[in-house]
């Protein structure tokens, strides 16, 4: 099925077939959304919580092919590979100042740490259908909000960077608390990043290189795309000033691809210059002792997967041959 020809509407809540109206006439069918189509085809598996989905073999084949393709594109970077679980130490998270900027997105891991009496109270509340969550306590880990966050404290502990700086290849599941019926706004999603640490000149050259590579990748995948200046979703009134400053300094660019029904195109890649933020939080220093600057090129593996399904259809056999070959012959 080629979903590009489907009539889709984000407001639709599912098919309404055979339902009569008060006048006795059949009610018009409710338009199917892209998310409905993905679920109907078994590509995404609903769990009952918006933004949390299981994935099918077809979906994972595309995602794994995309990850392998990004590895191929970045093979010349001589990057150090780092792979972290989707949790990070709470003290590093607190130091990062993420809660100052994005408290609405954070996820903290809680566990039961009580005694037998407290366990009895928890179970009793559970059986009565009452709230039991206040019986859990925060642990020393939080859910990773962005793949690059664990990298900076690790490298800071190693001491000064080499003269050429450093590039890190990092991948992680990430969590952001923004439940939505838009399939591209998952609460738990995969992010692949190349992170650059060094001088301002090194970071800006790195970012420009990856902007060009990202645009070529979108061309090769045969999806419509635009590059645009962007800002992160900083919280509150003060956050608007920070976001405006981020745009004024042209620190963040996003590559946008149409995915969601009747909505603006979705950011599937981002190219970021953090200036010296992370070297202010942690002692990241260049070889000559100056504060290191950092930047990253980030690829939303799940958003790119969805972008391909939206623009090429749910039946992989109908995709362009060149795109299928790029993704490992899926």
Image: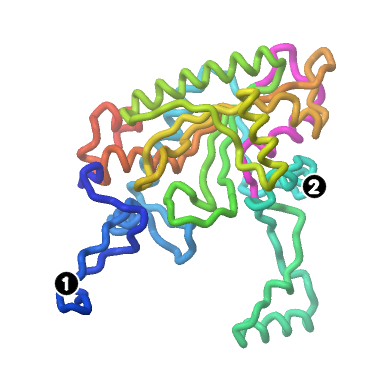
Count how many numbered circles sit on residues in the image: 2
x and y percent of residue 5 in the render? Answer: 21, 44
Q: Is residue 211 magenta?
A: no
Query: Looking at the rendering, which quadrant does residue 169 occupy?
Result: top right
Decide: few, some or many residues near mark 2? Use Cα within 10 Å; few <14, some 14-19, many ≥20: few
Could you give the CA–CA distance between mark 1 and mark 2, rounded to whole angstroms?
59 Å
Give whichever of discs 1 and 2 has the lower sequence position.
1
Q: In the drawing, does residue 310 fall left or right of residue 147? A: left
Q: In the drawing, does residue 50 fall left or right of residue 222? A: right
261 lies above or below 47? above
Q: Dot 1 lies on which element?
A: loop
Query: Looking at the rendering, which quadrant does residue 207 occupy?
Result: top right
The residue that label 1 is drawn on is 26
The residue that label 2 is drawn on is 91
Decide: few, some or many residues near mark 1? Use Cα within 10 Å; few <14, some 14-19, many ≥20: few
Residue at figure coordinates x 26%, y 58% from the top left: 31
Tell which tag, 1 or 2, sits nearer the viewer: 1
99 lies above or below 133? above
Query: Does the residue at mark 1 contact the one at mark 2 (Cβ under 8 Å)?
Result: no
Q: Dot 2 lies on which element?
A: helix
**Most prominent secondary structure in the magenta stretch?**
loop
Q: In this orientation, which residue lies closer to the viewer: 220 or 5?
A: 5
Residue at figure coordinates x 74%, y 12% from the top left: 163
118 lies above or below 35? below
Q: Is residue 158 magenta?
A: yes
x and y percent of residue 11 in the render? Answer: 36, 57
Q: In this orientation, which residue lies closer to the viewer: 281 or 173?
A: 281
Please report the bounds of the magenta region as a residue range: 143-166
x and y percent of residue 180 in the render? Answer: 48, 55
Q: In the drawing, does residue 87 fall left or right of residue 319? A: right
x and y percent of residue 25 in the render? Answer: 15, 74
């Amino acid at each position: 099925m080629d979903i590009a020809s489907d009539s889709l509407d984000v407001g639709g809540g599912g098919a309404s077939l055979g339902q009569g109206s008060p006048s006795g006439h059949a009610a018009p069918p409710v338009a199917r959304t892209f998310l409905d189509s993905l679920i109907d085809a078994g590509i995404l598996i609903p769990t009952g919580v918006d933004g949390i989905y299981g994935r099918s073999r077809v979906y994972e084949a595309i995602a794994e092919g995309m990850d392998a393709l990004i590895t191929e594109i970045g093979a010349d970077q001589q990057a150090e590979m780092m792979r972290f679980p989707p949790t990070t130490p709470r003290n590093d998270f607190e130091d990062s100042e993420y809660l100052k900027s994005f408290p609405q997105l954070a996820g903290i891991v809680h566990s039961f740490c009580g005694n037998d009496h407290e366990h009895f109270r928890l179970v009793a509340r559970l059986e009565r259908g009452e709230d039991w969550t206040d019986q859990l306590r925060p642990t020393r880990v939080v859910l990773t909000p962005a793949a690059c966050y664990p990298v900076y404290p690790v490298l800071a502990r190693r001491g000064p960077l080499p003269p050429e700086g450093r590039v890190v290849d990092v991948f992680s599941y990430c969590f952001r608390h923004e439940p939505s019926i838009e399939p591209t706004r998952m609460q738990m999603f995969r992010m692949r990043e190349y992170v650059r640490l060094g001088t301002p000149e090194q970071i800006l050259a790195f970012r420009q290189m990856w902007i060009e590579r990202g645009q070529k990748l979108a061309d090769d995948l045969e999806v419509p795309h635009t590059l645009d200046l962007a800002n992160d979703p900083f919280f509150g009134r003060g956050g608007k000033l920070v976001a405006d400053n981020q745009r004024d300094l042209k620190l963040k660019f996003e590559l946008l691809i149409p995915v969601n029904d009747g909505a603006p195109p979705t950011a599937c890649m981002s190219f970021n210059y953090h200036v010296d933020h992370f070297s202010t939080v942690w002692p990241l220093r260049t070889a000559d002792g100056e504060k290191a600057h950092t930047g990253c090129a980030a690829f939303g593996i799940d958003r790119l997967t969805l972008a391909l399904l939206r623009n090429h259809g749910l039946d992989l056999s109908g995709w362009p041959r060149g795109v299928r070959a790029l993704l490992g012959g899926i």
